[in-house]
Image (tube, rainbow, N blue to C red):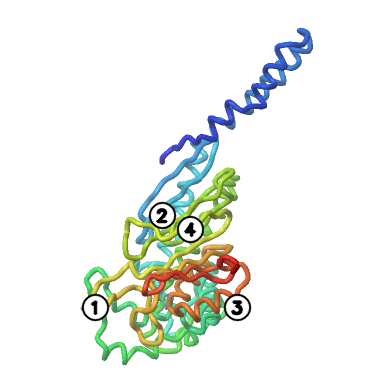
Amino acid sequence: MRRERSNLTMKAIFSQPLLFLFKRLLNPAHKILHRFMCFFSLLLLLQSAAACAQWFSDERAIMGTLVRVELWQQDAKKANTAIESVMTEMERINQLMSPLIASSELAKINSQAAQGAVVISPELFELITKAQDVAELSTGAFDISFASIGQYYDYRAGKQPEQASIDQLLDRINYQQIVLNKKHSSIRFLRQGMAIDLGGIAKGHAVDRGIALLARQGISNALVSAGGDTRLLGDKRGRPWLVAIKDPRHDDKQAVLIPLADVAISTSGDYERFFIDGDKRVHHIIQPSSGRSAAGVQSVSIIGPDSTTTDALSTAVFVLGVEKGLNLINSLAGIDAIIIDAKRKMHYSNDLRPPRR
Ligand code: AMP
Ligand code: MG
């Protein structure tokens, strides 16, 4: 865990009102001076407590990505406990939702739901319900059953499924073939050969859970991020947080730096997991209608009230492309988008566009 002493702390120690009060106290009669001295000591006590507050941060590799927590706290022990609680929560969600962990609930769904209804935890049921809502909203651009074909890609090994296998499995990608039963908290697939994956929404969910944990521990200024999903609790103590959108083609450069507070921002990019095949970039965001990587944009950033929503929508808008994607975002209150298209041109949703003169 890193401690970062803030300038604000030093400003608090030498603040002008305190110096003024101190000068005033040197003049009056002794009795009044004594009374004021008591008040003054109390003030100093409070000030020194505030002076100890500082930024704490930590980063860890969880869920196949880098998880970062940054928060403002007075007590180092409490800060440590708070950061640990977020990391533990992220690992818990990974164990529950990773398709790669044989004991996960998600793996159980994939191996059993085509045979009959599988009863799942309320948390997973709720998240899959939310994924289905976004599938409906995006007319199937976001579809967790993309994994019916997506599971046969291996980006590290540079492998992709043959066209014949894609043709054979394409009709397994259809969110309407996922049946949820709220009463029994169960899920069922209507076809053999179907699989689901929550890679487009689970990190956002984990970030939201992390922020909720910090808020419950009395923290009011914090950042939690997991890969491209970031949520901010409060501001950076009197200043906004500055969140960068990466240049999709230059790892060390930023396309934009956005001042934000108390919101979530998620970026989906074709540079996260990919390999190059001839003149094609084969990447991890799948167009459900073709079973191939979605083309047309390099990155999509969504700003909104919570990370579960922004995470799912960034993947959905990536698949929809510039025009349909912006139409969707412009129809949703309190959600904004910044898209970098295949020619590296930037597009903004209506509320982010500067007014025309
Ligand atoms: P993100 O990192 O939020 O952009 O999400 C990318 C991840 O979403 C991928 O690694 C897949 O796990 C998953 N994914 C890919 N294509 C889709 C899709 N069409 N609908 C839902 N999830 C998808
Ligand atoms: Mg996403």
Closer to the camera, 159 or 255? 255
Q: Helix, strand, or loop for circle 4?
A: strand
Q: Helix, strand, or loop for circle 3?
A: loop
Q: Helix, strand, or loop for circle 2?
A: strand
Q: Are marks 4 and 3 in contact (CB under 8 Å)?
A: no
Dot 4 or dot 1: first in sequence order is 4
C-alpha span from label 4 to label 3: 33 Å
Q: Nearer the viewer, mark 3 or mark 1?
A: 1
Task: Identify whether 93 is placed above or below 322.
Answer: above
Residue under label 4: 230
Identify the residue shown where x is 47% and y is 75%: 317
Residue type at the position of mark 2: Val
Residue under label 3: 183
Identify the residue shown where x is 41% and y is 54%: 67
Query: Which residue in the rendered view is the most extreme toward the top?
Result: 30
Closer to the camera, 231 or 336? 336
Identify the residue shown where x is 31% and y is 61%: 250
